[in-house]
Amino acid sequence: MITATSTPGSPSPYPTLGLPQIVVFNLLIFVWWLEVGLRVPALGAIRFEFLLAAIAAAMAIMRLQSAKRAPLQPRRGKVEDNSDITRCIVILLVVLTLSLPLAINFNVAWNAFFNRAVKLALIGVLISQFVVSPYTLRIHLFTLLLAFMKVGQEAFLGKITGNMVWENQGVPRLHGTAGTMFGDPNSLSGKTVSTVPWIWYLYPTIQRKWIKLLVAVQLVFAINIVIFTASRTGYMTFIAASILIVMFTNQKRARLIFLLMVAAIVTVTLLPQEYKGRFMSSFTGQEAEGASSITRKALLADSFNAFLENPLGIGMDCFPIYQAERDRNAQYTHNLYTQLLSETGIQGFLCFIALVVVVLRKLARTRRALMNVVERLEKHPRPGPADSDSRFDTELRDVHLLLATANALLVFVLVRLALGMFGHDFLEIYWWAAAGMAMALHNMRIVAEQRCDELTAVAQETGTTSPAPRPLFHRPRYGQR
């Protein structure tokens, strides 16, 4: 049940959730990322993940019904909602549904549609419904940290013992836990390198030292994975993430560039020769063993030709079948954009691009609004009473978290788009999770703006003021002007 009550004299509250709602949702997220049903057969047998998702969905519906019955909070002026993202999600799912009869293998396309589109879209919607305040956002981010720490720990131990490292394409490559979504080196590296923007932006907002230590450990795990999976996709995406972080940093950019250059020199100096060669093959095309680059180019041409022959698509996840029928390499496209064109047709491609553009636009607006709130809170004089000062500081801390999350999510989406040049990622959770988090951040931004208005109004009405304190965090990480 959702509650949002406030006491006299306090700013408008964020929505709150009951403990069962918070536990069920975050347990679902943890279980989904670690694929607990595959790791623990007993839980898989009772479809534990499905049960959690069903309970969370029922709770979300009850939450929406409760919100409709709750009295509306007074708002000044027209307030933007999330109907733009919702509309794009619905249209994309409808277009994918109508494209099913066109699939060259209906069963394969239906399985991909239901299990890799509908279910993942549901998780995105649940994120927008259960991440409703800085408090619930912290819990959600901590849940994700724990899940990826488990993956990182398994890979770290596997590298030390050597039981998860074996030669592939002429290079010893680190693999993830067999049978999971992290098993393939490219998948393990791609998913892990996507955490880099989150680590960079969120670390300064963390107050507790033990959580900072956990994040530092996760960074070590991530570096281990990115280097020793020998995934050129991971290498190039890490570079893309670094460039984007520099681009979104407006102050002390030269120092950041210098530090990245030093880190790059140290890494290349200490990197074993076989991994140096693997990295350089991204540019030269000369590989120690195999012809991965040539294969990828051939798949790129084949998938684009499949689109030209079938402009409305051959069906979700059906490209390997299409290739096999023509006695060609029956692999996936290894490219997000030709995957969309060949499997979902021009209509699916355009709907997906529209969803991504709307999500990025929403994030950009949210980011600008939160930067404005931070600036107002930092510059506004404080009222004399200590409890009022504390409210300002607490509010500033929460808005910094929202802004850091917006920055991390913006870079994350751009990184995934860059990685899409090397991976067939349409049927992954990234896009749906990004859409859900963008909606959640927008909702919290509306409340943050209202709370800022109310706090500054109270401060202006108070006769005594004291100088504004120094900012709690440095601005360069957040791209503030």
Image (cartoon, rainbow, N blue to C red):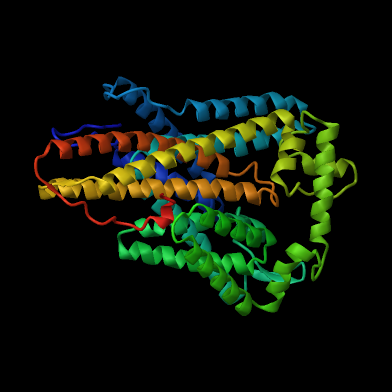
Of residues 462 and 120, the one drawn nearer to the viewer in this rendering: 462
Left or right: 114 as drawn, with respect to 127 = right
Of residues 418 and 330, the one drawn nearer to the viewer in this rendering: 418
Q: Residue at x 38, y 34 (%)?
A: 443
Q: How many marks on residues?
A: 0
Q: Residue at x 38, y 44 (%)?
A: 371
Q: Quarter-wise, where is residue 377 in the image?
A: top left
Left or right: 93 as drawn, with respect to 212 = right
Residue 384 lies, in percent from the top left, at 10, 47
Residue 107 lies, in percent from the top left, at 72, 33
Q: Is residue 180 visible?
A: yes
Residue 458 lies, in percent from the top left, at 16, 36
Q: Residue at x 44, y 39 (%)?
A: 127
Left or right: 236 as drawn, with respect to 156 = right
Q: Is residue 242 above or below residue 69?
A: below
Q: Is residue 184 visible?
A: no
Residue 246 lies, in percent from the top left, at 52, 57
Q: Quarter-wise, where is residue 264 in the image?
A: bottom right
- Quadrant of the image containing the N terminus: top left
Q: Quarter-wise, where is residue 439 in the image?
A: top left
Q: Residue furthest right?
A: 327
Of residues 44 and 314, the one drawn nearer to the viewer in this rendering: 314
Q: Residue at x 42, y 63 (%)?
A: 215
Left or right: 383 as drawn, with respect to 271 = left
